[in-house]
Image (spheres, rainbow, N blue to C red):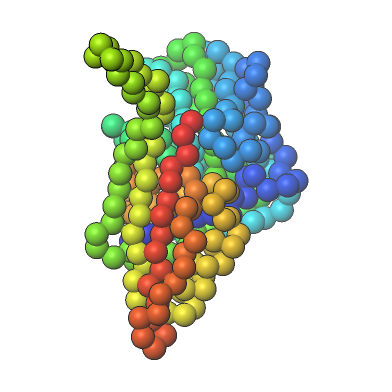
Amino acid sequence: MGARIAWNNLLTAPGVVISSSSEATGYVDDALANPLRWKRWRSLTQNADQWWKADLGANKNFQLLAAMNAKLHSSGGTLKAQANATDSWGAPTVNDTFSIPSPDLTKVLADWLGSVQNLRWIRFYFTDVGGVTDYVELGAVFAGTYLEPARSVSDGVFVGRIDPSVQRVALGGQRSAVTRAKYHRASGRFDMQTASARDDLRTLYETVGSTVPAIFTLDPSSPALTFYGTLQATLAATDRGPNLWDVPIEFTEDVA
């Protein structure tokens, strides 16, 4: 598996009908119609399973379901990515339990499906395994297909952890700081791409620009290398020879 970019989020498209098992004051389920990960849905604090659900209005293609900044029930709660053709959940077509990494460096839970699914209903289901009184939360959700160039990113990829906190030192040596949220930045090159692959990447950038959140992974099997944020490079291609192009990529993680 190589690097992938998923950018066409079905769950934030106009016309999607959103519902949930419950919602806390100020954390409504419709908040996740916005792709910004700090716009959160939170359930009521209850001793119960909880869910967030989307009706796409018709069957749509997707090969990735993802949840950002998820808070599960304490005492062993679980979260499932589910999808079905109908609003019936006894045996959904997709019914995958997310594995929670430790440490969870990027707060992205991604279910990369083995094949493209064409379904109408998407649900994220929290199971209260321990029977505790607690709330659950989601910071952003994603369903869509992805682009995986035949030639993956070249060696020499940069993955940095940025701390934008501001520190000040007084004349007497006393230090103070304004602490801000850290974020990742990843950059590299898709080298030796065909003209067709080059244009696929350029079309992607035309769609999302540098403002619409997407999911970028350097390795789909590694949660630590899977990020939710925005493209920051223009994907300007450099000619390497007959029908061969180098395409740089720079991706900045959104903070919650």
Q: Position of residue 80 (x, y in %)?
A: 47, 36
Residue 220 shows in the view:
no
**Residue 149 location in percent, x, y?**
41, 68
**Closest to the observer, 117 or 212:** 212
183 lies above or below 207: above
Could you say which quadrant of the image residue 131 lies in?
Answer: top left
Instruction: Please indicate whether residue 86 sits to the left or right of residue 77 in the image.
Output: right
* Residue 19 visible within the image: yes
Which residue is farthest front? Answer: 171
Point out the image quarter for the N terminus: bottom left
| Residue occupying the point 33% across, 59% down | 188
- Identified at 49% across, 78% down, the residue is 196
Q: Residue at x 57, y 28 (%)?
A: 40
Q: Kindly identify the residue that appears in the image at 41 percent across and 59 percent down.
A: 249
As drawn, 231 above or below 28: below
Residue 164 image point, x, y percent: 38, 32
Q: Position of residue 26 (x, y in %)?
A: 65, 19
Left of 44 or right of it: where is 244?
A: left
Name which quarter of the figure residue 246 lies in.
bottom left
Q: Number of numbered discs present?
A: 0
Taking 100 as reference, is 251 above or below it? below
Determine whether 175 is above or below 115 in the image: above
